[in-house]
Image (spheres, rainbow, N blue to C red):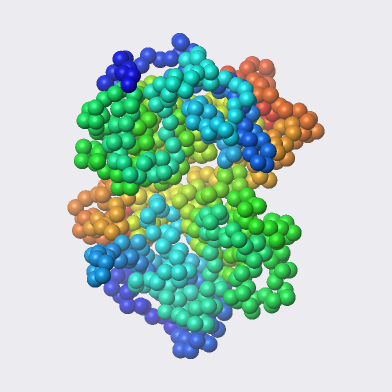
Amino acid sequence: MAELSKNDEQEATPNVSDVEVVDAHSETEAVAAIEAPVDRGEPILQVRNLKKHFPLTQGILFKRQIGAVKAVDGISFDLHQGETLGIVGESGCGKSTVAKLLMNLERATAGEIFYKGQDITKLSGRALKAVRRNIQMVFQDPYTSLNPRMTVGDIIGEPFDIHPEVAPKGDRRRKVQELLDVVGLNPEYINRYPHQFSGGQRQRIGIARGLALNPEIIICDEPVSALDVSVQAQVINLMERLQDEFNLSYLFIAHDLSIVRHISDRVGVMYLGKMAEIGSDEQIYDHPTHPYTQALLSAVPVPDPEAREHRERIILTGDVPSPANPPSGCSFRTRCWKAQDKCSVETPLLAVPEVFMGVDSPAAHESACHFAEEKNVVHAA
Amino acid sequence: MTIIEDSVPVPAPRKGGADDGPLLEVRDLHVEFHTREGVAKAVNGVNYSVSAGETLAVLGESGSGKSVTAQAIMGILDMPPARIPQGEILFRGQDMLKMSGEERRKIRGQKIAMIFQDALSSLNPVLSVGYQLGEMFRVHQGLSKKEAKAKAIELMDRVKIPAAAARVNDYPHQFSGGMRQRIMIAMALALEPDLIIADEPTTALDVTVQAQVMDLLADLQREYNMGLILITHDLGVVADVADKIAVMYAGRIVERAPVHELYKRPAHPYTRGLLDSIPRLDQKGQELYAIKGLPPNLLRIPTGCAFNPRCPKAQDICRTDVPALLPVSEQDGTELVGRGSACHFWKETIHG
């Protein structure tokens, strides 16, 4: 049963398919819907107009709200089963807040997150617990995301305390050792503590913990940015192998555009709490149409000194504006070289730009810009 | 308070240092740290040189000794636990390791300055940026507070901080990451040094801001004809700005080359592995090549070539003999200028 949510009517997002909402009146039905399998390539997670505003208050006793930091300000995207969706953007653009919202660690201000047709922002109790089992997270910093007082076995086995149905008590040790083996660590390390491992090994422990409950989606928030170059490749390869082996869907959040291109099937570019452009990796990297994406890509240093002479570089001026007080209209207009009067008045919607409408070209993908125009910035002219 | 007479208020381009030899020369430098677990050998015989107007990039992973070498040059190593058992650091032909503390202090800041990685923790949070910038002029040139502040505003203008006069009394937390790094650069530039050491200057910054900061640094370097030592782990940044590269591994330079040569034909398996293991923005590759294993523990550096446990080409000789950094030549024997590789099998690596 297809049904448009209220928000969709107000701010039409034309190119996001309608969500098939599964009507579940009882908790049992919701749990059943959550545990049903999804075919490969079908949407498993659908985000619609998601917003998170953090209030800014003044006063101690009588707090009044004087504004809000619009960390995430109306984003919509789909994550398909078995794919990797990369989210890139500068610091402060809201990508980590999106991760927290999807994990239900933060309550959304508005909008919906459908997991297999169930809106997880409204779930509670058993149904929410079932969702949480299926969406796991790998954190950025392998030094602070593991408890230094717990052994590796306890860290990886802790999810089983909350979801005992996955591994019965007597079976846990064996299960943890299996997980260690899967991520390429010696199963005999089960009684060691995190400080006895290097950064790359710790990140493997974090990944093993994420895998413990056989989730369907893993949200990776900058999983390799704290690692050395030679170790980064090991962890990236491990994550790709695990995706095939366990049929996982990844939401891969990172600021390193080269790594995102390598691992992702589709890529979304965020700027100031909004999605600027989204499409397949080829569409975004080889045929970007949003000026922000173009600037971002052209700023990435390419490890090839020959390319530096031929590449056009777009150097943006200034910094990202404060999300507490974003510019009117298009939020990128303050740093954009194409900005005109229209940009300050009218907020561009995330849609296939009119110029590319009906054109069979990789440039025809969703881009939130009034003056979208294809420009190849990655390859030397 | 010593007043330096030859300080010129307006930047005047210096004459090139090509004729009077390299600006800085590091010769066979060793640094070790005495810890409870044993002696950690962080730097084991490093040689490099920088001339005026030249950019040397020192590339390496964490623990390769790249930052320790820089700290030894600046004279800001904590000694103890650090010790420099042998080596020379020649600045304009004079060995800085033999100088008194007073002599070194005159060089530090005035002749050689350093830009640190994390601008937020390198700036004092309880002093305004204007005060911190002015400190250089007050201490080294004996200027009054008022004069120093005027100089600070001038500097902030030079590193393109908007509304410098209005922001000179602001505190570090009121600036964004990119602006803070500009203040660090301004501070290093204050006394127009001959050489700047930049230790991962853009690692904590976003790509768009990183591009701004690296551009600024390159412009200023050209303007003042400074030597620049850029310490980084990012092969992309190096390709954009460096003239020559020194690749470090476990406290040694394993390969040395002009920037174009290194990317085209690496002569050391470690460099080759690094280049193969980074994903490229302009092409979608298959599985990434990964260097197996971990960087060595500096308390227990493997015998022979330190890279041998991770090297796909390792033979028996690699486990026993330490390879020296030797010149690299073409197949017909013509020497490749400025190139060197510390691998027993460099011929196979570069030509095979």
Q: Choose between A153 and A333: the one closer to the eye.
A: A153
What residue is shown at x 67% (from left), y 42% (from top)? B37
Q: Residue furthest top?
A: B19
Query: Is residue B185 shown left or right of residue B38?
Result: left
Q: Quadrant of the C terminus of chain A?
A: top left
Quadrant location of the N terminus of chain A in the rendered image? bottom left
Q: Quadrant of residue A210?
A: bottom right
The answer to whether residue B67 is left or right of residue B146 is right
Q: Position of residue A147 (x, y in %)?
A: 57, 61
Kindly give the residue lying farthest to the front in the view shown: B1
Asked if one can make out residue A42 in the rendered structure from this viewpoint, the answer is: no
For the residue pair A7 and B31, the one nearer the viewer reads as B31
Q: Image quarter for residue B160?
A: top left
Is residue B254 shown above or below A379? Answer: above
In the image, residue B10 above or below residue A185:
above
The residue under the point 47% across, 78% down is A117
Task: Give percent across and percent down for residue A155.
Answer: 62, 64
Residue A156 at least partly seen? yes
Residue A281 picture location, percent across and down: 48, 54
Q: How many numbered callouts? A: 0
Q: Position of residue A303 (x, y in %)?
A: 51, 37
Q: Residue at x 36, y 41 (%)?
A: B124
Report the front residue among A248 and A221. A221
